[in-house]
Amino acid sequence: MFIEKVQINNFRSIRNGDVSFGEISTFLGRNGVGKSTVLYALESFYNVGAQYSCLDYYNHEQTDTSIRIRITYGGLRPDEAAEFGSYVHGGKLIVTKVINQGGARYFGTLAQIPSFAELRRLGAKEKRAGMKTLIESGAVPGFPDLPTKGDDVDRVMEEYEAAHPELTEPIECETQFFGPRNVGGGKLDKFTKFVLVPAVRDAATEMEKRGAIMQLLDLIVTRRISSRQDFQEFKQEFDAKARQLYGKENLPELAELGTLVTDRLKRYAPGAELLIDFAELKPPTIPLPDAVVTVSEDNFKVPVRYNGHGLQRALILALLEQLSMTQPDPVAANDTGAAAPQEPLRLPDLILAIEEPELYLHPARSRYLAKVLRDLARRDTDAALPGIQVVCVTHSPYFVAVEHFDEVRMCRKAASTDANEPHVTTFTSFTRHQAAQRLAEVTGRPPEDFTADTFAARAAPVLNSIVNEGLFADVAVVVEGDSDVAALWAMQTAMDQKWDELGIVVVPVSGKNNIDRAVVAFQGFGIPTYFIFDGDKPKNKGATTNRTLLQLGAAAATDFPATGINRGCAVFEDNLETYLQGVAGEHYESLRDKCSAQYGYDYPNKALKNSEVMAMFLQEARAVGIEFPILQKIVEMISSIARELRIAPTGTTKPK
């Protein structure tokens, strides 16, 4: 069972948050917007003994309102659905943790008739009277005869609800979802396990039982040992011995004790009798011994807690890679025996939350880890193998992909409706289906011409880690190629616009026909986006694409536009190089050749794709009195968009 949705209320910076989850969910956003708050809300949900203070409330001064963390689980296997029974509705299990000054409690949702739910809170006598009133009012047509005993009313209500599911609604009721198995409803930890890998944690804490290293190690060890035949045989023998030991045939003392107490009970309640028996026995799980982890580095052997953060993080990544294997590791067939288990050991599905996975890693290792995490995110049909759901918070483009932007959850801070209250964390998601429909809208073509799959197929070949950086931008600028990047960056440097400081990212997408995909994706996440393209008028080609891009940039659509600047986009009548040549006139080739020779280029016509060469070209042009006003105005327009965001209230950015 995997998490499908999390609703968080009144927890730290999240006042009212509703976040959907997939096999992989990646949270992006500036520092301080509350990305990791989602991970720590999940940890608080899974940690029965979590401690809370006023600092965990959205408003530290108003702790009279409860913190609520509600998780909707989906994809339940048959044994999971059977275990939770009436708590499952439409294949979903909804569990809520409510935290307030009175402590923390868990609630499940049962399918109940609302009026019945109110009666269940009453005593037996009041409950029967209330049901009688409902029957007489005609609110429950076809209800059977009212039982004479108030205690039997619950049973009849349950039977009526089962026969009339259309009258029921999911209603919360307190249940023990965590804790010892088979005690109340304490079954959730049998099927789902949460492991948090924080960005930084004290080494000693990491080696505690709840630390990421020990939890991952426990999963791997259990998975490997569970495949041994001798382990399975021991488990079966243990179960059989436990049932035999606690069976009523072996424990006549229970019946004898009942008789002894009954003799005394009759003195106070003649006719009463006490019967004592054990409930159906489900043998306990046999715990494995605690693993003792030691790391030897350069022949220096010490416990893990004495190693640095880098080595600890490397160990966690090695454990994750081991966990990503689809089959248990083979064990040498020796006298202890190794074979497929006769009855698979039920391992819980893993919810793996990793904060800033790129920490302490070189770029190549980051790319590799991103692949490992994608391989990890799976749901296996073999009940002995845990399915794994990955949730991560990152600042690295290696862990996101524009072609997989369905996985992205963009986090921002927005002003509260009450000016006196703290800013709140908001979440934005955008699907490929929504992107396809947006393209249909701007092109004017039928929606059925665009699908989520066709959008991804067109986008995947050109959207790379450079383009992915646009998802981390305060303002994304989409251009056709490297020469556009060089010209814009050189001009903003010459104008001292400080684009790095403003969070402006320029991304090339290898051609005009690829601009629309990137722009739609960035705008869908509420990232202010500006784009520049070539009109190609002299070549008399690309008229349809020109119209689409102009509409996407909220400009008047025309087949071959003149050079111009709009609020959402800019266009050159032919292309950037033609514009530069037209302005520089007779000086163009001499300036270009001088700059290309300075930087050792054999082909001057390609030299201006380099930002250093372009910067020198602009500097040399200015030295002879040549300015490029269109390029300057484009840079000013982009800078103004970024500066407006700095002035506007935090988090209120909208697509341009």
Image (cartoon, rainbow, N blue to C red):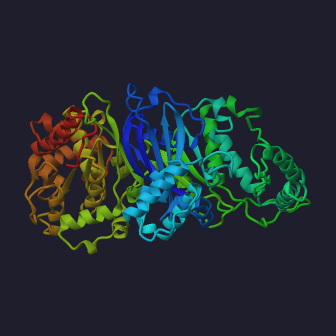
**Residue 277: x, y in percent?**
80, 54
The image quarter containing residue 431 is bottom left
- Left/right placement of residue 619 relative to residue 232 reads left
- Left/right placement of residue 535 relative to residue 158 reads left
**Residue 539: x, y in percent?**
14, 67
Q: How many labels were placed on the picture?
A: 0
Q: Residue at x 9, y 64 (%)?
A: 558
**Residue 639: x, y in percent?**
20, 38
Q: Residue at x 47, y 44 (%)?
A: 69
**Residue 269: x, y in percent?**
74, 46
Q: Residue at x 67, y 31 (%)?
A: 307
Q: Residue at x 17, y 49 (%)?
A: 589
- Left/right placement of residue 308 relative to residue 329 reads left
Q: Which image quarter is the N terminus in?
A: bottom right
Of residues 272 and 25, which is closer to you in this image?
272
Of residues 218 and 76, which is closer to you in this image?
76
- Left/right placement of residue 59 relative to residue 618 reads right
Of residues 162 and 433, which is closer to you in this image?
162
Of residues 517 and 36, which is closer to you in this image?
36
Question: Does residue 40 sit above or below 450 in this rendering?
Answer: above
Residue 144 visible to the viewer: yes
Residue 461 visible to the viewer: no
Question: Does residue 70 sit above or below 452 in this rendering?
Answer: above
The residue most toward the top is 61
